[in-house]
Image: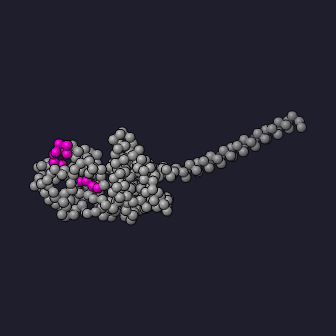
Amino acid sequence: MSVRRSILFVLTLLMISVLAACGNGDAEGAASESEAESANETIDMGQISWAENIAVTNMWKVILEEKGYDVKFHLLDMGTQMAALANDELDVNLEFWLPVQDKHYFERYQEEIDFSEEVWYDNAKVGLVVPAYMEDINSIEDLNENKDLFEGKIIGFDPGAGTMDVTEEMIEEYELEFELVPSSEPAMITVIEESVKAEEPVVAPLWNPHRVFSEMDLKYLEDPKKSFGETEKIHHAKRLGFADDYPEVDQWLKNWKMDDDAIGELMSYVAEAEAAGEDPIVGAEKWVDDNRELVDEWLSE
């Protein structure tokens, strides 16, 4: 073979090798990218700075990320979450209260959002609370005659929350000479804690489940007009089409059920993690590890 032909032969072999390597690299790259996409599908989850919501959102983040999903939190008020679900900008909201607290959102968006029929907690309660040491104030009807004691203020939390709207309606229904002062849940709890320590008057809307009832001696005021309803049930809500895009996750959420002990323990674990300066997910991870049997029930078909 001549030197020229030998050189051409070697160059040809090198070209074939390079093309083969490029082809394999592209195929392997595409396969890897495809696997990464399927293994790390992102679920955009709404979060609200309420104790029970922080607990359950972190719990589901732990569960879903163990299954290969990537959960991204969006800290938004309830009104913004509902609009985002309706506009396909958010996948899931884990806490929606019916029949009273969030009914106006249900009525407004029932054609645009997939509100679950399934209930994950069926023993919720909402109402005005005062410290138990306020022995002479036991009903909402007692508030007006003690207006000066409370400086005419009901300490509230996040504007746009269903319970805040219901509280405004309650003020009108009972013709209370009170102003509802919005803030945030942590700020409201701080005011209640400081008032209790000083044994001073304070009135605020609160709800069960909530860890605060295990930390302070509070009582619900009687609600003769049933403005806050009676027993509330907590559902979840999803954007339309979520069930088609994530049928497995959709079924897991439908299977999800918690009783007083389960939600109470979860909230305690998360609160302990936060008190230790750790991320809430540390408490959620511990709870999931300690409750594998229950979690496995939710993840069944």
Residue 174 visible in the current orientation: yes
* Magenta segment: 195-208
Residue sitting at x 41%, y 44%: 282
Instruction: Quadrant for residue 171, please give it.
Output: bottom left
Residue sitting at x 45%, y 56%: 293
In x, y percent, where is residue 160? 29, 54
Viewer-proximal residue among 152 and 199? 199
47 shown above or below 11:
below
Please state, as top left, top right, bottom left or bottom right, where the N terminus lies in the image.
top right
In x, y percent, where is residue 95? 36, 56
In x, y percent, where is residue 219? 21, 54
Residue sitting at x 48%, y 60%: 300
Residue sitting at x 35%, y 44%: 272
User: Does the magenta-highlighted stretch encompass residue 198?
Assistant: yes
Horizontal placement of 240 versus 31: left or right?
left
Residue 171 visible in the current orientation: no
User: Does the magenta-highlighted stretch encompass residue 273?
Assistant: no
Horizontal placement of 276 versus 300: left or right?
left
Residue furthest to the right in view is 1
Horizontal placement of 168 versus 281: left or right?
left
Q: How is the image coloured?
A: one colour
Viewer-proximal residue among 62 and 242? 62
In x, y percent, where is residue 52? 34, 52
Instruction: Quadrant for residue 144, please give it.
Output: bottom left
- How many marks do you count on the picture? 0
